[in-house]
Amino acid sequence: MGEFSKSTTGGRGSRRACGSERAACGCAIRKRSIAHPHRLGRSLALPLLLLLLTGCASRNPQAQIRNPRTTLVFLPGAGGRLPVNEEFIYAILQERIATEAIQLDWTHQRNLGQVMREVDRNHAFAESVRDELRAIRKRNPNGQIILAAHSAGTGIAVWALEQAGEPLVDDLLLLAPALSKDYDLGPALSHVKHHAWAYWCPLDVTILGAGTKSMGTIDRKFEPAAGLTGFSFADPKFTQVKIDYADLHTTTAWAHVSVLTQEYVHDEVAPRLRSR
């Protein structure tokens, strides 16, 4: 079975006094590693420091925590643990969408070619993610789980849910998915309790256009990925969100990660999660 590195932000067991607002949102900080502890420290340092300095103050101070026990589980793309991933996690916590965040790095220090080609190994990592989701659900049976994945990590998320056997997460976020546009999301969505969103950008031509044509999508189709074109799949509890140029808070060269920025989470991602 695949191993992954895990870091946790928030949750019980290490709550520190940081003002009344911090105590209310419960965004305490703790980290725990599995398999590769040497990979955990540096990328989390800045966002965690910002959380401490700001007291977890939401950009929308009137916003209420959607559920007092909501866990964000984040799966990075093929690049593994990157600062922009931490920006997304920080933004979700700051917006009070979740009270705890866990990042599962399934890439296991492999190079990009290995990450995209090793199908059997990737499915094994998906089994580990499924088991982690089950463990979270068992620990917090009345809480909620938001599963978010970026780029190639969306394949791991979808495969984990396909193997679930029961509804494991409340909501699913597929961010710039490196899955093929005709991938059948039905089996995965059957294990999502509430809603799923896929965010795609027609400007993501470098990574999800030329890149997946040459190296393949995570499900091994050599074509533009769904993160560039949108999925052909449709379902009442599945919404696709097109990221237009006007929505980008960066240059078009960084279109692949625009969905992870704090500004985009505040403007587009958080409101949808609150309203469902």
Image (cartoon, rainbow, N blue to C red):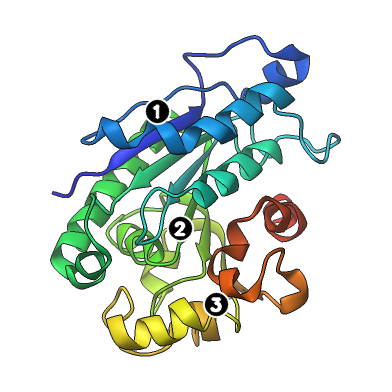
Please name whichever residue, 180 or 245, is drawn nearer the observer in this view of the structure. Answer: 245
- Amino acid carrying label 1: it is Arg
Residue 138: x and y in percent read 37, 32
Name the residue tied to disc 3: 235
Q: Circle 2 — which element?
A: strand
Question: Could you tell which of marks 3 and 2 lies nearer the N-terminus?
Answer: 2
- Amino acid carrying label 2: it is Ala
Question: Could you tell which of marks 3 and 1 lies nearer the N-terminus?
Answer: 1
Question: Could you tell which of marks 1 and 2 lies nearer the N-terminus?
Answer: 1
Crowdedness of circle 1 by 10 Å Cα count: few (<14), some, many (20+)?
A: few
Q: Circle 3 — which element?
A: loop
In the rendered image, the residue lying farthest to the top is 17
Q: Is residue 221 visible?
A: no
Q: Kindly check if marks 1 and 2 are in contact, taking CB atoms under 8 A apart as contact.
A: no
Please name whichever residue, 207 or 196, is drawn nearer the observer in this view of the structure. Answer: 207
Height in image: 49 above or below 166? above
- Left or right for 232, reference 243: left
Q: Is residue 53 visible?
A: yes
Q: Which mark is residue 149?
A: 2
Q: Kindly check if marks 3 and 1 are in contact, taking CB atoms under 8 A apart as contact.
A: no
Which residue shows up at 52% across the image and 22% down it?
Answer: 29
Mark 3 and mark 1: span between their CA atoms? 30 Å
- Amino acid carrying label 3: it is Asp
Which residue shows up at 72% across the image and 77% down it?
Answer: 245
Quadrant including the C terminus:
bottom right
Mark 1 and mark 2: span between their CA atoms? 22 Å
Which residue shows up at 75% across the image and 54% down it?
Answer: 271
Q: Disc count in the image?
A: 3
Which residue shows up at 56% across the image and 14% down it?
Answer: 15
Residue 34: x and y in percent read 25, 33
Crowdedness of circle 2 by 10 Å Cα count: few (<14), some, many (20+)?
A: many
Name the residue tied to disc 1: 139
